[in-house]
Amino acid sequence: AQKVTQAQTEISVVEKEDVTLDCVYETRDTTYYLFWYKQPPSGELVFLIRRNSFDEQNEISGRYSWNFQKSTSSFNFTITASQVVDSAVYFCALSEWYDSGYALNFGKGTSLLVTP
Amino acid sequence: NAGVTQTPKFRVLKTGQSMTLLCAQDMNHEYMYWYRQDPGMGLRLIHYSVGEGTTAKGEVPDGYNVSRLKKQNFLLGLESAAPSQTSVYFCASSRGQSYSGANVLTFGAGSRLTVL
């Protein structure tokens, strides 16, 4: 079975610090997709990014950036100059084929607390 | 657009009672999913559907049944609730057939179920 590991259970930083959330995955597929979702304290799940296995270019969106390294099977997420509003649980996920379709296989999540 | 709507948002059951969670999406999505979220466990796939009239098992299907009689609705049933089914349940949907797992999942707000 495929696997997504988010080794950091909880991270606490002070506002304006940079923080990196780690994600390591295992798959036998040559074509696959990786995702990051954010779950703020309100509880909903918000899509952040999707990356396919053929595109190793790093992506930047404002204060968010993602580093995909196929050689180390990692898809890490960095928040630059963190803000209190970044406090949330962040999930990394890998597309996985089940019996009749694809679904997302999620890591256990990293809880990020940003304090003023 | 409402997106994905789950009802009810909260429910308390006694052991052995039955109930149904309703998920409705208005995006004409083909795929629908039910996940459960437990502390420290991330999100785990219960059942999913790749189209109207189809259902399939995910990672943790035992104790649950599902039905997809209409394309826009995906029902999750508990026939005899157990305390181990206390959880937050998330429904999600995604667009039509993807042969490489590229589909982005749109999630509902979640349903918190407590079984006493």
Image (spheres, coloured by chain):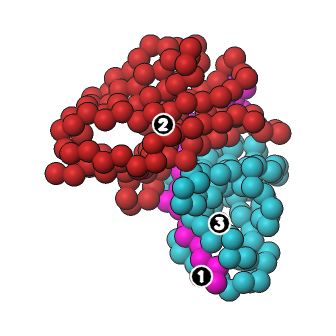
Chain colours: A red, B cyan
Q: What's the chain of the residue with tag 1? A: B
Q: Image quarter for residue A29?
A: top right
Mark 2 touching mark 3, by CB under 8 A? no
Q: In the image, which residues are magenta? A: B97-116
Q: Are marks 2 and 3 on the same chain?
A: no
Q: Which structural element holds mark 2? A: strand
- Front-most of residues A6 and A52: A6
- Front-most of residues B63 and B55: B63
Mark 3 touching mark 1, by CB under 8 A? no
Residue A36, numbered circle? 2
Q: Are marks 3 and 1 on the same chain?
A: yes
**In the rendered structure, which amino acid carries the disc numbered 1?**
Val
**In the rendered structure, which amino acid carries the disc numbered 2?**
Trp
**In the rendered structure, which amino acid carries the disc numbered 3?**
Leu
Q: Which residue is mark 1?
A: B12
Q: Which structural element holds mark 3? A: strand
Q: Does the magenta segment cover residue B113?
A: yes
Horizontal relation, residue B46 to residue B10: left or right: right
How far across and how far down the image is residue A47, in percent? 46, 40
Marks 1/2: CA distance?
Answer: 31 Å
Marks 3/1: CA distance?
Answer: 16 Å
Horizontal relation, residue A76 to residue B94: left or right: left
| Residue that appears at 66% across and 36% down | A3
Which label lies toward us, 3 or 1? 1
Circle 2: is it few (<14), some (14-19), or many (20+) Cα within 10 Å?
Answer: many
| Residue that appears at 73% across and 77% down | B81
Q: Image quarter for residue B98?
A: top right
Q: Which residue is mark 3?
A: B22
